[in-house]
Image: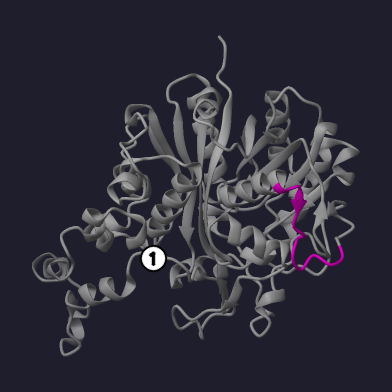
């Protein structure tokens, strides 16, 4: 069966470096860092007190006027997804229901909603702790009854739940990212939510790629979003001993992917959503094309759900699958967009995977890692990296990996350091790996060509 060709026509990025792919990419090229001391909540009791925060943009400016009331039931993760979706649609030049309703395009909607899908990766959304704590307090047995201290389900049912709005739970379901995006832009084709940690975006993009390949849709908005910038997100990573703890006074130099002195990662927030489009449709409307998606592979670490395989076997398999799917050779890869968390064991495993899958070429090919500037954006990480890679191909400029000064000899990679380099890679390999769960994924993007 003939497969449709799939191209990238829209990039929507919301990151600690700014709103939109242009600001984020320029920030990487200019070697700016989006990691700062945490101000969103009191982090004084934590060993790591730094994070990447999105400070630009407002969700109300990314939805039709009639939908603004719905923003009241959006958790931070949902807001980031809706903002990124709006930016992606605008960047692609699509006249969706949202764009037309906002009066930002002349004429009628030019998208067949029944052929417009959505696949969005999501993480564990943190409940509003202030609201929840207040409600729980009303269900506590009072201290004046020393023999009856604790939590009362009866009081929770009679009083506690009444302190939460009826739609409170809808703010915190992972599928609500895709729910709001599909409603705002009227996406009625196949839709899905994927919750596989940092691999979520790549897996969502891969599924969208397959959907368009087989002709089940003409367009798909895909990627991921997450905010780890909350007490629970910080606590989880702290308890798992993944965070940098010795740079609280120098956050801009904290996260050091593949560096010999790396000591952990940094929590962050962000979103990346792409518009994938059937090539014939994109060409017919004269859309700008950032690149063509030609390969996808995925695998899982069957050794342990928290610890990476030292030899990177799962990721190596995902890379090999993606390269085979693209019908190219390892030596054809001109740039690797690595996950590069900055965690010693995970970086070493990823480096081993790259060397195993690419052979001798794995030590020579330029490697880009963005975590030093952006931190760990959770489910949004992968799509942000794909968007950066697509922009690098378009501009012919590859940003350096911030804070990577001396590459760990044990990693043995050609990580881009110092200044941006001019390059026009024909094929880019983008990687993602879940820190918990072991899912890995790889995508191959080809520079735009006929």
Q: According to the image, what is the colour scheme of the structure?
A: one colour
Confirm whether residue 428 shows in the render.
yes
Where is residue 249 shown, x and y percent of the image? Answer: 66, 85
- Asked if residue 207 is positioned above or below residue 338 in the image, the reply reads above
Residue of label 1: 58
The residue tagged with tag 1: helix, strand or loop? loop
Which residues, given as a range, are shown in magenta? 395-406
Seen in the image, is 55 located left or right of residue 291?
left
Pick out the residue farthest to the top.
1
Number of numbered discs visible in the structure rendering:
1
Confirm whether residue 433 shows in the render.
no
Q: Nearer the viewer, residue 428 or 375?
A: 428
Q: Nearer the viewer, residue 346 or 228?
A: 228
Examine the residues drawn in magenta and state their main secondary structure.
Answer: loop
- Asked if residue 87 is positioned above or below residue 228 in the image, the reply reads above
Image quadrant assignment for residue 163: bottom left
Seen in the image, is 73 located left or right of residue 435?
left
Q: Nearer the viewer, residue 351 or 276?
A: 276
Pick out the residue farthest to the front.
106
The residue lying at 65 percent from left, 58 percent from top is 25
């Amino acid at each position: 069966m003939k497969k449709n060709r799939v191209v990238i026509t829209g990039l929507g990025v919301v990151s600690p470096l700014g709103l939109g792919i242009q600001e984020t990419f320029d920030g990487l090229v200019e070697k700016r860092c989006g990691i700062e001391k945490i101000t969103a909540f009191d982090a004084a009791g934590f060993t790591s007190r730094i994070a990447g925060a999105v400070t630009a943009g407002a969700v109300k400016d990314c939805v039709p006027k009639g939908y603004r009331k719905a923003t009241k039931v959006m958790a931070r993760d949902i807001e980031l997804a809706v903002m990124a979706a709006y930016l992606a649609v605008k960047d692609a030049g699509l006249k969706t229901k949202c764009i037309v309703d906002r009066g930002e395009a002349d004429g009628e909607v030019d998208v067949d909603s029944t052929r417009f899908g959505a696949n969005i990766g999501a993480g564990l959304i943190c409940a509003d702790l202030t609201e929840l704590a207040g409600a729980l307090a009303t269900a506590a047995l009072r201290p004046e009854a020393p023999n009856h201290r604790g939590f009362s389900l009866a009081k929770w049912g009679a009083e506690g739940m009444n302190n939460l709005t009826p739609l409170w739970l809808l703010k915190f379901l992972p599928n609500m990212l895709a729910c709001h995006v599909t409603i705002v832009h009227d996406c009625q084709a196949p839709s899905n939510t994927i919750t596989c940690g940092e691999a979520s975006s790549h897996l969502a993009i891969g599924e969208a790629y397959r959907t368009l390949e087989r002709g089940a849709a003409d367009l798909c908005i895909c990627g991921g979003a997450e905010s780890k910038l909350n007490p629970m997100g910080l606590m989880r990573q702290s308890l798992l001993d993944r965070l940098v703890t010795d740079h609280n006074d120098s956050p801009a130099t904290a996260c050091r992917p593949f560096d010999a002195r790396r000591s952990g990662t940094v929590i962050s927030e962000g979103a990346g959503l792409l518009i994938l489009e059937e090539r014939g449709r994109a060409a017919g409307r004269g859309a700008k094309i950032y690149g063509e998606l030609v390969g996808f592979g995925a695998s899982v670490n069957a050794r342990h759900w928290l610890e990476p395989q030292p030899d990177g076997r799962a990721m190596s398999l995902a890379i090999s699958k993606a390269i085979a799917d693209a019908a190219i050779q390892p030596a054809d890869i001109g740039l690797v967009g690595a996950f590069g968390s900055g965690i010693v064991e995970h970086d070493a495993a990823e480096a081993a995977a790259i060397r195993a899958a690419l052979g001798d070429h794995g030590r020579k090919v330029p490697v880009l890692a963005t975590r030093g500037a952006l931190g760990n954006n959770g489910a949004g990480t992968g799509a942000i990296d794909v968007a950066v890679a697509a922009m690098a191909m378009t501009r012919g400029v590859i940003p350096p990996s911030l804070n990577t000064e001396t590459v760990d000899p044990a990693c043995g990679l050609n990580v881009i350091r110092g200044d941006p380099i001019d390059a026009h890679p024909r094929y880019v390999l983008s990687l993602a790996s879940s820190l918990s769960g072991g899912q890995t994924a790889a995508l191959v993007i080809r520079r735009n060509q006929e």
